Image: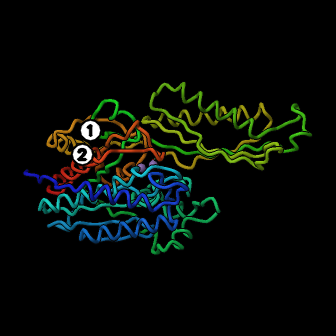
Amino acid sequence: MSLPSPVTDIDRLMAELHQLASISDASVPPPAVTRVVFTPKDLEAREYLHGLYQDAGLEVRVDAIGNMFARWRGSKPDLPAVGTGSHTDAIPHAGMYDGTVGVLGGLEAIRSLQRAGFQPRRSIEVVMFTSEEPTRFGIGCTGSRLMSGALTPDLLSQLRDGEGDGYDTVRRVAGFQGELKDCLLMDEYYSAFIELHIEQGPMLEQEQLDIGIVTAIAAPATAEFTVMGEGGHAGGVLMPARRDALAAASEMILAIEARAKGSVSPDLVATVGCVDVHPGAVNSIPSRVVFTLDLRDIDGANRDLVLREIGDQVETISKRRNVEVEWRVLNADPPALSDQRVVDAVERATNRLKLSSRKMISRAYHDSLFMARVAPMGMIFIPCRGGVSHRPDEYSSPEQIKAGVETLAITLAELSSS
Ligand code: HGY
Ligand code: MN
Ligand code: MN
């Protein structure tokens, strides 16, 4: 099969990435980015993308929660399309490459094939998934979960943000109407789905490699713990009489860290990223603490075992400290495996471009974790400086981004020609 040589305009792509980064609620200028789902900046970013898609002559549709699909029609438009894409929402004070490289890079991959005069047999479609990040509603990937059936419309409608506003209300106020059930992709909607993303880890840079060919995506779980003690005056309550919710939660958090460090699986990671202390006054003993747990492993069974053990340890600590604890699992997803045909196509693309590469797992989750349920999935990683992500100093160079885009373009060309 003779595949085209992509004609990539990396300067244009970098300008678009910087323009997108400027659409942000971060308190400091780019490269820090904050862009939370269904906020005005998120909507402004979508408008910007929509314009770029139209300039490229793509057919755009938006579903009931804002997933945006931009399609380059193939010569056999009735065949299942080849999909690519990622997300443009960003957690508070994040970087400008997480997700956006897969959305704008997916668009540039299409444009690079258009410039090369390539005509796909299958349509090629770039997706901007709504809310890959868990920032607002507590779980991530609501767009790809709804598309793949991993989340039902009913369960999605039960999600609430920090203001107590329901997902369904918020999406309608943001201007997205239509039936949630229609977000579910019909069978065989895509013949393959490939996502380009920064690695969000140090391996490619340490091994001085150009491309990561993802073979599996780790299994994420999120839980929320509520510890109830007894408040009181910081001066008036002597130590033996205290039931301090924050001291108890602190012991629980250290126990979580110790359990993760002691895991037989080196891929198990545990993070307590949010702690809410009530009443949060300097001279008042904390009466209630709510904290979150992000627990992941490529081995789903080990993750679930550790989650159960953490629950037991938290209960033991609560009894010893005479506080109450309630906890609930928000999501506990299985890992996903990449499809061998897609992995092989990516590898052939790196060989053709004379790029160094390695097979690897993704420790971060992505929309591809759920797209794997409805299509043969693959991911292409590019290095990011120091492995840093979810921070303003997240960075991939234009050369690294170009290598990722061209690997994606050739992979899309091959998979859309069959
Ligand atoms: O948390 C993650 O793995 C992804 O970056 N949302
Ligand atoms: Mn992220
Ligand atoms: Mn991401």
Q: Would you call the spot at circle 1 few (<14 residues within 10 Å), some (14-19), or many (20 or more)? A: many
The colour style of the image is rainbow
Q: Is residue 345 visible?
A: yes
The residue positioned farthest toward the front in the image shown: 29
Q: Position of residue 395 (x, y in %)?
A: 39, 44
Of residue 47 and residue 275, the one placed in the foreground of this image is: 47
Q: Quadrant of the C terminus?
A: bottom left
Residue identified by numbered label 2: 403
Q: Residue at point 31% right, 30% down?
A: 207
Of residue 26 and residue 251, the one placed in the foreground of this image is: 26
Tally the numbered discs: 2
The residue positioned farthest toward the left in the image shown: 2
Q: Is residue 334 visible?
A: no
Of residue 231 and residue 315, the one placed in the foreground of this image is: 231
Mark 1 → mark 2, Cα distance in angstroms: 7 Å
Q: Position of residue 40 (x, y in %)?
A: 51, 68
Q: Is residue 241 left or right of residue 74?
A: right
Q: Circle 1 sits in a helix, a strand or a loop, which is it? A: loop
Q: Position of residue 343 (x, y in %)?
A: 24, 42
Ligand 3: does it lie within 8 Å of the C-beta at label 1?
no
Residue identified by numbered label 1: 210
> Mark 2 is on which residue type?
Ala
Report if the CB atoms under discs 1 and 2 are less than 8 Å apart.
Answer: yes
Ligand 3: does it lie within 8 Å of the C-beta at label 2?
no
Q: Residue at point 69% right, 45% down?
A: 326
Quadrant hosting residue 212: top left
Q: Circle 2 sits in a helix, a strand or a loop, which is it? A: helix
Q: Residue at point 22% right, 47% down?
A: 407
Q: Is residue 240 left or right of residue 149?
A: right
Q: Residue at point 21% right, 63% down?
A: 123
If you read the primary sequence from the N terminus, does the residue marked by circle 1 or circle 2 appear first?
1
Quadrant hosting residue 396: top left
